[in-house]
Image (cartoon, rainbow, N blue to C red):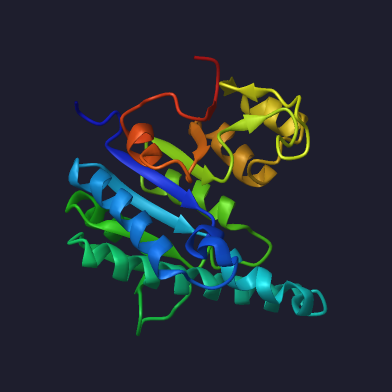
Amino acid sequence: MAPRYKRILLKLSGEVLAGGGGFGIDGESVRLLAEELSEVARQGVQLGLVIGGGNFFRGVAAAARKMDRVTADSMGMLATIINCLAMQDALEKQGIPTRVMSALQINQVAEPYIRRRAIRHLEKGRVVLFGGGTSNPFFSTDSAGSLRALEIGAEILAKATGVDGVYDKDPRKHTDAVKYEHVDYDQVLAKNLAVMDAAAVAMCRDNKMPIRVFNLTTRGNIMRMSMGEPVGTLIGTAL
């Protein structure tokens, strides 16, 4: 069976790299995730990844509250580059060629982000890891994911989370929470469903980029999503 999508931008939270520890990088968690991503890449899917920095930055969040916002956001952007390098190492141990491209100038460890070069890497079968956010403070890695998805011409933005889709309320706090199979962008914004930040959702809405929100902790869900199976919740215009 051929994959449903040729090119995907996958947005991961930094916490998934920390495993059960909640902070830093857990080698086994990174290895298992790399195995799943490798299986998808071997199917011919062109993968771009944006990884958050929460596994590092949330650990210093208390101190960061007293910092200048621009400084604190710069620290978060550097954390995303650390995560990209860790994932690059794990993927290449699986035999998957990769490139880390950074929106921040850090040429000793990552290529500068250049859109055309990123697309060329994808066309050559390399997994591209986009670090450094957008290089601008006040923008989250959700916004970076939406921006890169649009720039590289991805067919879908896939948001991997710790829950199995979008609910009308937090399912971890409310037993009567109802899961959406499909929800419109405007509903997400109007009801403040908080699966992604508002700027990221609005960017996708304005450019008709579908978003698939699914549970990363279920083994095989990345492959199922790439094959077009209805895992999680689809955010987009009416089907």
Of the pair 90 and 207, the residue shown nearer to us: 90
Q: Is residue 164 positioned above or below 133 on the image?
A: above
Where residue 177 appears, x then y in whole percent?
73, 27
Does 200 sit left or right of 211 as displayed? right
The quarter of the picture where the N terminus appears is top left
Q: Residue furthest top?
A: 239
Does 150 sit left or right of 153 as displayed? right
Where residue 219 appears, x then y in whole percent?
39, 42
Q: Is residue 191 positioned above or below 9 on the image?
A: above
What residue is at 37 percent from the left and 55 percent from the top? 33
Of the pair 58 and 19, the residue shown nearer to us: 19
Q: Is residue 59 positioned above or below 170 on the image?
A: below
Q: Residue furthest bottom?
A: 108
What residue is at 50 percent from the left and 45 percent from the top? 160
Residue 53 in sight in this render: no
Does 131 sit left or right of 188 as displayed? left
What residue is at 46 percent from the left and 28 percent from the top? 231
Where residue 198 appears, x then y in whole percent?
69, 43
Q: Residue furthest right?
A: 66
